[in-house]
Amino acid sequence: MHFLGVDVGGTKTHVLIADELGNVIVFEEGPGANYQGIGVEKAYDTLRQVIERALKSASLNLNELDAAFFGVAGADFEYENRIVRSMLDRLGLKRYAFDNDGRIALRSGTLDDIGIMISCGTGGINYACDGKRIERIGGFSSFFGERLGSYIVAKKVASAIVRAKDGRSENTLMVEMFESQIGSKIEDIMHYEYEGDYERMREYAVLLIRTLFSAVHRHDFVAMKIMCEIVDETVRIVEAFRKRLNFTPPIKLVLEGSFFKNADPVIFEMILSALGRDYRLIVPKHPPVVGAVLLAAELIGYKFSERSVEKLMGFWGDRV
């Protein structure tokens, strides 16, 4: 048997084909295929091409895929799901299903679907399941309540630097630290944001977040305040899920997304300090697309053995 898992993101698309024993046949990465950012036709073409490339590498054809599951960024509401469904139908798969990309991250991080998953990547989204019910919190935009996401965090740092320079906020070491990294003043990069140069702004976002962590180690007040805001939001999300679902400690808390995967360990210590002893922190090395493969298998009633899951995760040097 062969299972296809696809993680459709705004910045990149991951395609994973694995067999029933957990052997990774092929793992392919392509550009983002979120229709909200590039339009339906371009999203479909991007998705089709990266899947075809994966099939060619695996020496398989479409009919040899027993089931497929897609985690799709932006699959939030019914009208969006209709668009996604019409796009995926055109791929010609014999059996598939899809959900929001946060759903596959929950499965990938917990493996058994029981726990809490908080993602802080390009954006933020949160899922949890107690074995009986699956709940989702957020995953929209900062305009509609999101306070986590790499870009949101980077904006906090950039704002703090600018406001420190003009006197509206406290002084921060991050001014000198960031400007020395880019070799110019922060004002010199503002036009990239105004012009919508998202690729360049993503590069600066990475540098801003690195500056934040470095400044925390130098006990910078403003940097530590931003870190506390991130921890506070993480705790609020966990507490909101605890009100909705019934968990038995130790509770798996999966921290997913580029921000957490590249974070300084100090933030994990802060989160555990704030939450207490009921939680087991998990920062997966393997990507969320692993969860898509596990969910694809379930579509035909197949369950991977623990050994097969270990083999699947081992491809990325991770373990159960």
Image (cartoon, grey):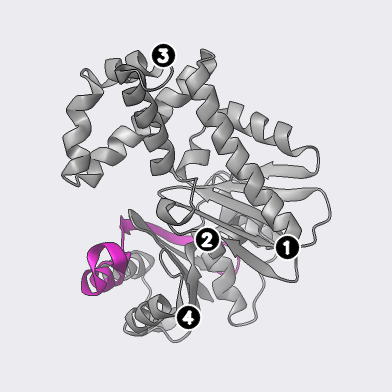
**Which quadrant is home to the N terminus?**
bottom right
Chain-order first, disc 1 or disc 2: 2
Secondary structure under the numbered disc 1 in the rendered image: helix
Separation of marks 2 and 4 at Cα, in angstroms: 17 Å
Horizontally, residue 19 falls left or right of residue 134, namely: left
Question: Where is residue 158, by image quadrant?
Answer: top left
Q: Position of residue 136 (x, y in %)?
A: 59, 63
Is residue 149 in view?
Answer: yes
Please give the range of residues in magenta: 19-48
Amino acid tagged 4: Tyr
Q: Residue 239's spot in the image, x, y percent? A: 71, 50
Q: Which residue is mark 3?
A: 173
Secondary element under disc 2, as helix, strand or loop, is: helix
Q: Position of residue 137 (x, y in %)?
A: 58, 60
Q: CA distance from mark 3 to mark 2?
A: 35 Å
Write the residue at 33% across / 53% down: 11
The residue mark sitting in front, 1 or 2, is 1
Q: Determine crowd level at label 2: few under 14, some 14-19, many 20+ residues with C-alpha closer than 10 A.
A: many
Label 3 amino acid? Leu
